Amino acid sequence: MIFLNSIFKLEESTIENLLRAIVIILLSSVKFVAGPTVVYFNEKYDFSFLKTNFYTITGGMLGVAIILYLSPFIMKLWYWLKHLIHEFMHPRDYYFSEPTVDTNHPVEVHYNYVQNKKQKKLFTPRNRRIIRVWKKYGLWGVAWLTPILLSIPVGTFIMTRLERKKKKIVFKLLIAIVVWSFTLTSLFELLHVRMIPEILP
């Protein structure tokens, strides 16, 4: 019985560690900073220095791969859902009325374009900052900001609009993610802190 209990406890701990590793990977794939922060903030995540870096880097690159290779499908799905919701919420809100005619002769139909009432601001303060960084530092600048400020999905999506070669994007983001991962975990280890605000003066 003691032997069986020890085996079950071992299996439970293995499953728990696996689930915790998956949580860190998923967190890092979206908000990279959250990965190492959760590990050092929550005592249940008793991962070593190397394991923490492995999970956060894996998660970061997973997020890059998903956005990089599935972004066209994601955008099509997003526009389809947006159109579907608009049709559901505003079934009669059309830009053009349906032409009505009752004649046997050929009819020429003319449409007048109308301006959309709600126009999205393309040059928001955040977009301007991103453009300034890109013009000054290029893709490397966006890559370095992605894990810390922009988040993995947003930064990767921006880079796909600035660079067509996916290998360049993957290489630059891999370097940035590895450097930031080891930097954050090293600061947490050396300064004995658990959250990023504690590092700042």
Image (tube, grey):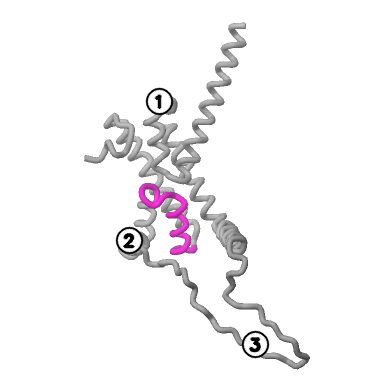
Q: Percent from the top left, x then y, of residue 5? A: 59, 11
Res 8 seen here = yes
Left or right for 198, reference 102: left
Q: Position of residue 130 (x, y in %)?
A: 36, 60
The residues bearing labels 2 and 1 have C-alpha atoms spaced at a distance of 37 Å
Q: Which residue position is annotated with label 1?
A: 43
Secondary structure under tag 3 reads loop
Q: Is residue 6 magenta?
A: no
- Dominant secondary-structure state across the stretch colored magenta: helix
Q: Position of residue 180 (x, y in %)?
A: 36, 44
Instruction: Name the amino acid type tagged 1.
Output: Glu
Label 1 to label 3, Cα distance in Å? Answer: 70 Å
Q: Which residue in the protein does label 3 denote?
A: 109
Q: In the picture provided, is 175 more to the left or to the right than 62?
A: left
Query: Looking at the picture, how far across and down is residue 196, in whole percent?
Result: 31, 39
Q: Which residues are magenta?
A: 146-164
Between discs 1 and 3, the one toward the N terminus: 1
- Element type at mark 2: helix
Q: Amino acid at mark 2?
A: Arg
Q: Residue placed at 59% from the left, 84% from the top? A: 111
Which SS class for mark 1?
loop
Q: Earlier in the sequence, mark 2 or mark 1?
A: 1
